[in-house]
Amino acid sequence: MDELIAKFGVDFIIKNLAFPFYPHDALTRGTFISGGKEAGKTNLAKILTYLLKKKGCVIKVVDGSRAWLRNTPIKNIVKINSLGSIEQSPITESVVFDVSSLLPDNQAYFIGTLLERDFNFITSLVCQKCQHSLLLNQQNYTWYCPKCQTEYNYAWYCYWLEEAQLILRSGSLRARASQCALRMVTVGRNFKEAIGLLTQFPALIDTNTIKACGLAYFGRAWEQNDLRKLERLVSWTRSRCEDVFKTLGVGQFVFQKVGEDATRKIIRVPEFINGFNPISETQLLPQKKPSTSIFSKILGIE
Ligand SMILES: Nc1ncnc2c1ncn2[C@@H]1O[C@H](COP(=O)(O)OP(=O)(O)O)[C@@H](O)[C@H]1O
Ligand SMILES: [Mg+2]
Ligand SMILES: [Zn+2]
């Protein structure tokens, strides 16, 4: 274990069950989650959803894996059978869209339709008193009427996209979805819209798009092209990337917050169990003292 610390250096701080989550960064800059199959990406996104919902955010999930249909922090599930079926879903409530019966290109098309519909809704909000278009106060994130000054405390809208590589790769049907997602990454905060991208294949997603996300959770990876991408994202040497990313287990992620590269750390995410709710916010707060014994435990080396 000492050997590992010597190898990885002092920025490699591991905290027992510390779960660094910064809602402000998640909302204003977006979240990125990568990791191979069964790395625990969806579980992590469910926890983040649970926490954001507690803060009053409206969360929409586009899921082709059916993993959100059970044990989910969102009760409202809408099955999408055709591209037109979005109309039945309420704009202002949290929803899981089950797109498992659509082909990947159509899933991408659906994402484009959803993001565009909601964006148009949000950008056409008007004052209930004088019908003037609302503007967003960037200081406190409240909508206000520039004419009569009435304030409206509408929620943040947050979108989790499973298999984000489907839309962030080129392709004609995907292009619209990709444009909508990129718009959200870059200017979403100006409309109180936030995005969360999940992928098994970080290598397929543009580096700048990932870097634009405020919070990043990188789970286990072993493919050479994914490791190469992660190397650029976390600025570690190739051998450290191999050591770390090939060793991470289920629910373990390298966490990185934008602008705080030095505090990059491995975290262990608790399991989300709906109805039982084992997660308390205090439990999730980073603990002050790093525990070295946990260090070895997390990496599975005693
Ligand atoms: N933090 C965790 N602790 C314990 N088990 C977990 C954790 N995260 C995920 N799992 C379990 O591992 C399996 C895969 O998790 P999931 O989140 O669906 O992975 P992914 O989305 O990366 O494929 C699930 O059965 C889940 O219950
Ligand atoms: Mg998943
Ligand atoms: Zn007004």
Image (cartoon, rainbow, N blue to C red):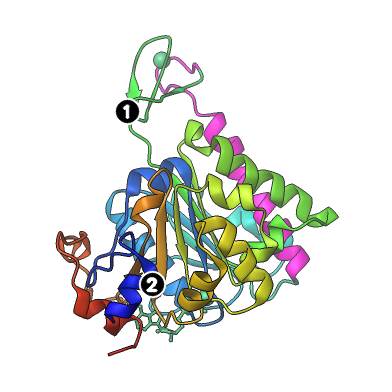
Q: Dot 2: within a 10 Å radius of its alpha carbon, few (fewer than 14), some, or many (20 or more) residues?
A: few
Question: Relative to 31, is 77 above or below?
Answer: below
Q: Amino acid at mark 2?
A: Lys
Residue 7 disc label: 2
Q: Would you name the residue on which mark 1 appears?
A: 140
Question: Relative to 128, is 38 above or below?
Answer: below
State which region is magenta.
104-132
User: Residue 149: x percent and y percent?
Assistant: 35, 13
What's the residue at 19%, 66% (across, down)? 290
Q: Amino acid at mark 1?
A: Asn
What's the residue at 66%, 75% (across, down)? 224
Nearest the camera: 199 or 274? Answer: 199
What's the residue at 56%, 81% (across, down)? 37
- Asked if residue 126 lies in the magenta stretch, the reply is yes
- Asked if residue 101 lies in the magenta stretch, the reply is no
User: Dividing the image into 4 quarters, which one contains the C terminus?
Assistant: bottom left
Q: What is the spatial separation of the Cα atoms under label 2 and label 1, in whole angstroms?
A: 43 Å
